[in-house]
Amino acid sequence: MRNAEANQPLYLRVASALEELIQTGALRPGERVPSIRRASRQHSVSANTVVEAYLALENRGLIEGRPKSGFFVRPRKIAQQKKAAPAFRQLRSAPVSVASLQSRIFDAARSPDVVPFGAAYPSAKVLPAEKLARITAALARSQSARSISYDMPPGNDALRRQIAKRALDAGTTLSPDEIITTCGATEALALALRAVTKPGDVVAIESPTYFGILQLLEDLRLRALEVPTDPINGLDLAALDKSLRTERVAAVVCVPNCSNPLGATMPDAAKDELATMLRKREIPLVEDDVNGELTHAAARGKVAQAFDRDGWVLLCGSYSKTLAPGYRVGWIAPGRFYERVKTLKLTTTLATPSLTQMAVAEFLANGGYDHHLRSLRGLFVDQLQRSRATVLRSFPAGTRVNNPSGGFVLWIQLPPGTSGLEIHDRALAEGISVAPGNMFSAAPRYTDCLRINCAHPRSAKLEAALAKLGSIAAQRM
Ligand SMILES: Cc1ncc(COP(=O)(O)O)c(C=O)c1O
């Protein structure tokens, strides 16, 4: 919510958010606006408030109700004005050295014979591969020239409009003009860190954290300040606040929704506290929301960026976990660092591949993405619960396993003294890949942990491999 909106009645705030999407072109003339039910979820207001908001917009001639079909953006009589550039918005650090283990995990992921519990990506079998292939092929034929041409930053218009529209579900409003498309979230995170840090700077991160973030810190010669992270509520804000008093922190990287590897989701009040704490200190927050849409709750959590009024959050996302990891379609909304990130994008990959952006945009607009997300979430919940049950049955007594709030990975803590790395080595010799816990920290931590990917359809082979891991763990105690 922006400053000026803070004192408005609720229905006017809802109306302003929608008006912004219409003015910026994220919602175009003739397009359906979110249903009353969806909008009431998006804004956490009653259906009546949404109806009031929609009637206000209808009175202003911006939308129109159509019997039995909902509300639609009204065709414009005058040319739509393009909006002006949006007004913008006792732990110790240590060097990072994690790269070699990571490449072992990804090498194992390349082999079709290895059971893929290691790298955290969904199997193509649970993704809409055929539908995407049809869309991509049709686009390659119908728009062949465009699909092979550069699509210079900020990237595909239709895709940025779709991302802006979906941002409402995450409790925020983004204009397509605030978004730059990227080659996956990995590039978004790299651009964000390059924009706000220089070699030698300290970056505060969750602990344990996604190892790709550690690798980025290593590549950029940044020091990691690891902040304890709770498996349920995420980043420990009291610990972060305390460490900000003793260390000069250049940026914070956080995965507030459905984190990796813990599957934690920060309560919205904590996200507000985090964004406010950092804004006051003028410290950029690199927010990674790749798993936000994979919540196991009825509605997805807000992004911390929703609580940022001054552009200090660089919000990163991608469609690698929900649609197509290999399409490499991601995005960043870098707030006040927009121009810097756009320039850096040019010097890293120049442009994001055109055809896959077009295909993802089309899938989001007309491919039944919400329906797909619902079934994917259901599948992940089911597989995680079944895998948890197998772990509790097959691993040695004293093993603990988390109950993630979203995503598709399990974090297993083995009985004290058991080495995750040793189990990794033994398991790989048996054709099973797992991620040992020490990959998720720059310090020698989580050595008795393992992370298991549960985003592959359950099968007798996978079930047996998980039970086998348990017996390897039992032998190594
Ligand atoms: C938390 C997190 N961020 C970023 C990524 C990388 O995403 P992408 O494949 O879009 O680059 C991953 C992939 O595992 C992840 O788990």
Image: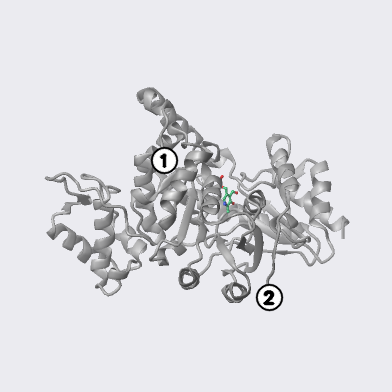
Rendering quarter of residue 87: bottom left
State the residue position of label 2: 90
Rendered location of residue 436, percent (x, y)? 75, 53
Relative to 260, residue 155 above or below: above
Q: Is mark 1 within 8 Å of ligand 1?
A: no
Q: Which is nearer the eye, 287 or 437?
A: 287
Could you tell me which quadrant the C terminus lies in?
bottom right
Label 2, residues with CA under 10 Å away: few <14, some 14-19, many ≥20: few
Res. 256 in view: yes
Relative to 421, residue 305 above or below: below
Amino acid type assigned to the residue bearing label 1 in the image:
Pro
Rendered location of residue 363, percent (x, y)? 40, 39
Label 1, residues with CA under 10 Å away: few <14, some 14-19, many ≥20: some
Q: CA distance from mark 1 to mark 2?
A: 42 Å
Residue sitting at x 69%, y 55%: 451
Rendered location of residue 6, percent (x, y)? 30, 72
Residue sitting at x 62%, y 58%: 385
Amino acid type assigned to the residue bearing label 2 in the image:
Gln
Residue sitting at x 80%, y 65%: 415
Rendered location of residue 39, percent (x, y)? 31, 60
State the residue position of label 1: 153
Q: Which is nearer the eye, 85 or 457?
A: 85
